[in-house]
Image (tube, rainbow, N blue to C red):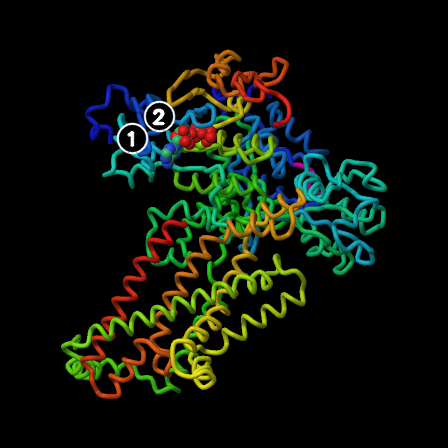
Amino acid sequence: MSAAAPETQAGHSRWVLRVNDAKKTFEDGTPALKDVSLEVRPGEFVVVLGPSGAGKTTLLRSIIGLERLTAGEVWLDGARVETANLAETRRKVGMIFQGFNLIDNLSALNNVLSGLLDTRGNLATLFYIFKRSDKLSALQCLDQVGLLDKAYQAAGKLSGGQRQRVGVARALIRQPRVLLADEPVASLDPMIAFTVLSLIKEICAKQNIAVICNLHQVDLALRFADRIVGLSDGRVLLDEKPDAINEDYIRRIYAGHGQGMYFGAGGGPADDTIHFDTLAPGPLP
Amino acid sequence: MTDRSIDGPPPEFGIKALTMVVAPASDHAGGLDLQGLTDHLSREIGLPIDLIRCENYGEAIEALASGAAALGWLGPHAYVKAARDGHVEPFAVGMPAGGASPNYQSLFVVRDDSKITTLAEVRNHRIAVGDPHSTSGYIVPRRELADIGIRIESESDFAEIIQASNHDDALRMVVDGAVDLAPVSSVNFDENLRSGIIKPGRLRVIHRSPDIPGAPLVYAAALAPDLKRRIKDTVLRAHEHMEIGGYGGALERYVDPAEARAKLLAAYIRPQWTWRTYLAIGALIGVIWLVAVDLEVDPMALMQSAGSYFADIIGRMMPPDFSDLPALLLAMLETVEIALLGTVLAISLSIPVALCAARNTAPNYAVYLVARVITVFFRAIPEFILAMILVIAIGFGAMPGVLALGFHTMGFLAKFYADAAEDVDFGPIDALNSMGAPRMQVVAFAIVPQIVAPFIGYNLYILDRNIRMATMLGIVGAGGIGYELQAAFRMFEYQRVSAIIILIFATIFVIDMISSRIRARFQ
Ligand SMILES: Nc1ncnc2c1ncn2[C@@H]1O[C@H](COP(=O)(O)OP(=O)(O)OP(=O)(O)O)[C@@H](O)[C@H]1O
Ligand SMILES: [Mg+2]
C-alpha cells in the first residue's frame, strides 16, 4: 500500500493521517481554513481545541472529502485523499457526531449495523437483514460500549449518553484506521461526557485507532488528549502534549473570544469586545 | 511458593504442587464442582492440585495475585478486577449442559407467600446480600436497585442488611424467613431447584437482571507459558475423558474464552423478521391475488392484446388537430382560471378551519370536533358530485366549478395544515407561553413559521391537482377545456382529442415548473 504513494516522504508510515497546508475558502468567500498542517499517528488521541468558527468542523469534513479543499492535501493511511478514492478513504474512517445522528426508529443493533452499509450494499440489507457474522460483530461493539442489553431497544428511546455510545459502536464496527469525532460530548452531562470519552480513548488505544476529536471543554482535552492542537481563525496556533499546555496557551487559542479565563483566575470572563452598552449604559430612551 | 518461576528446575516445570482457589459462590459440590476436573488435570500434568474453597472473594484474588495460588475460579466481577490488575488470565469457560448459553442473571427472590411483587417494594424489608465482590449477589443487584433509587448498602433503605456467605446461604435465609428477600445467581437458584434442596413453589422471583457473562477459569499471569498451555489444553479436552463439572453443576465442556465470548454474543442474535412478518406478507399477497381474480383482472391477457388496442387508438388520434388553437387556448385559460380561483377559495377557507381542527390550536374540544367533521365531510364528497349539484342549482358556467373545487380541496388543505400544526416542535411554543404571549401570537410566531414550507408545498400541489380536476368538471358543464374535450369525444374527433390532451399536458408541465421554482424559494 505504501509503495502506491511514491511522493510521500520517508517514514510516512508513522502517520496514519496527514494534512498538508490545507486551505478552504467557501463559495461565499468565508476563509474557514487558512493554513492547517497536522499529523496523527496510529492509536494517537488528538484533541482539536478552538473557539467557535475556528474551522474545526470544516477540518474534519475536509478530511473525509465532505468539503473540497481549496489548496493543500490530505493523506490517509498512505494514500492521498482525492475525489477518485473517496469511497476507499471513507471506508477507513469512522465518524461520531455531536447530535449523534442515529436513526431513532431503528434498534441500537441496526444503527450499529448501518456502519457497515458501505460494504454491504446488497438487497438483503435493504430489508435490514445482515449476515450472522455481521450481527455478532455489531453485538460485540455494543458490548464494548456496555450496551449489549439495549441491543433491541429503539435508538430514540435511549438516553443521550447511551445514544452517543451507540454512535461510538457504529463508528467502531467499521474497524477504522481513523476516528473523527466532532464535539462528541457537547450535549452530554459532565459525568456522561467523561464516560463516553474514556470509552473512546480506551477502545481506540487498544485497537490502535487514531482519533481526532473536536472539543470545547479544555479540562476534558487536558485529561484525554495525547496531543492538543489549538486552532484559531483557520490556523494551527499550537500543537503540543497536554502537559506542555498552560493557561497562557489556552488564552492564546481563545484570544478575543471571552473564554480566556477558563482556568478561573478570578473575576468575570476576559471580554475585550466593545459593547455599545459600555458606551451608553442603562435603558434605551 | 516463590520457586514457581519460568526458569525453575525439573521435574515438570519446577513446581511440586499447584493450588486452585475457588470463590465462595456455593457451599456444596452440586453447586460448584471442580474436584473431578482438578483430579483429571492433576493426573495429566503430573502435579498434585490442592483445591481450596475460599471464605470470601478477596481472599481468592489475593492468593492469585501473590502467587500462593496458580489456578482459580473467581466469578465475573472479581475476575474482571484481578484481570485488570494483570494478576490473572482466563483460559477456559464452562458451557452448561444442554447447549445453554453461559450467560446467567441475578435474581431477586422472595418467599412465595411474601407481599413483595416488584423491585420498588423491597424498601424497608430485610435483605441478605452477597460478598461485595460477588457479581450476582452484590454488584449487579446494587446497580439494579440504584436505577430505582434504592441503595443496597444503606441501612436507611432496608430494615436489616445481612451478609450471606454464599448464594446457597442467602437462599436458605429467605426460605427460613431470616430475611425477606435476597439477590442470588440464577445458576445457584436453578441448581438448588434441580437438586431438590429448595422445593418448587417455595420461592418466587420478583426481578431478573440483564445477562451476566459466565466467569472463566483463570491461571496466575506469572505461571510458566508451557505449563499454562498444558493446563489449558487438558481442561479444554477434559470432556472427552470424563463427566465434568463447574459452576452450576454438570457442564458439557470447557471452551476457549474467545469461543465462549462468541457464544455469549450469539445468545443475543434474534431474527430481523419473525414468522409473523412473513405470514403478514403472505396474507397480503393472497388477498391481492383473490381480489384480482374476483375482478377478473388478467394481467397476462392484457399484456398480450395491449399492443393491438393501443396501436388502433393511437392511429386514430394521430396527427393531433390544432386547427382551432385560439379557441382551445381560451378554454384552457378558463380552466386554469377556475382552478386558480377554486384554490384561492380553498386556501382562505381552510386556514381558519385548520386552526380549529388542530388540537394544539383549537380553542376548545367542541370546536375541534366540528372542524374535523367539516374537513371530513368535504373530502368525502367528490367535486364531481358537488359540481353536478351546483350546476343544477345555479346553472352552467365557471361558478359551480370554482365552488366545487374550493370546498372539496378546502377539506384536504384543512386536514394537511391541521396535521402539520400538530406535528410542530413544541419547544418554541413552550418558550412563548412561558413568556405569556397571547394565544394568536403564539400561533403566528411559533407555529406559522414552522409550517410555511409544507403550506406552500400543499397549496401548489392543490393548484396542480385542481387544474387537472377542473378539466374534468367541464364535462359536467362547469366550463373550460373539459367541455371541449367532451364535445370532441362525442363527435368522434379523436385528432382534436389528442390536441386537447397535449395542451393539458403542456399546461400542467408549465405549472409544475413554476411551482418547483416557488417551492425551492421556501425550502
Ligand atoms: N457551508 C458553509 N458555507 C459558508 N461558510 C461556512 C460553511 N460552513 C462553515 N462556514 C464558516 O466557516 C467558518 C468555520 O466554521 P466551522 O464550522 O468549521 O467552525 P467550528 O470551529 O467547527 O465552530 P464551532 O465550534 O462553533 O462548531 C465559520 O466562519 C463558518 O461560518
Ligand atoms: Mg463545529
Q: Which residue is mark 1?
A: A69
Residue B280: numbered disc: none
Q: Look at the numbered disc 2 and say if its residue's Cβ is closer than 8 Å to ligand 1.
A: yes
Quarter of the image where ligand 1 sits: top left
**Residue B335 placement: quadrant:** bottom left
Q: Residue at x 70, y 52 (%)?
A: B207
Q: Residue at x 69, y 49 (%)?
A: B107
Q: Which residue is mark 2?
A: A33
**Residue A4 placement: quadrant:** top left
Tell me, yes or no, whether the highlighted magenta stretch contains residue B26.
yes
Q: Nearer the viewer, residue A153 or A56?
A: A56
Q: What is the crowding at mark 1: few (fewer than 14 residues within 10 Å), some, or many (at least 20)?
A: many
Q: Residue at x 31, y 34 (%)?
A: A27
Q: Chain of mark 1?
A: A
CB under 8 Å between discs 2 and 1: yes
Structural distance between the alpha carbons of marks 2 and 1: 9 Å
Say if B294 sits above or below A109 in the image.
below
Q: Main secondary structure of the magenta part?
A: loop
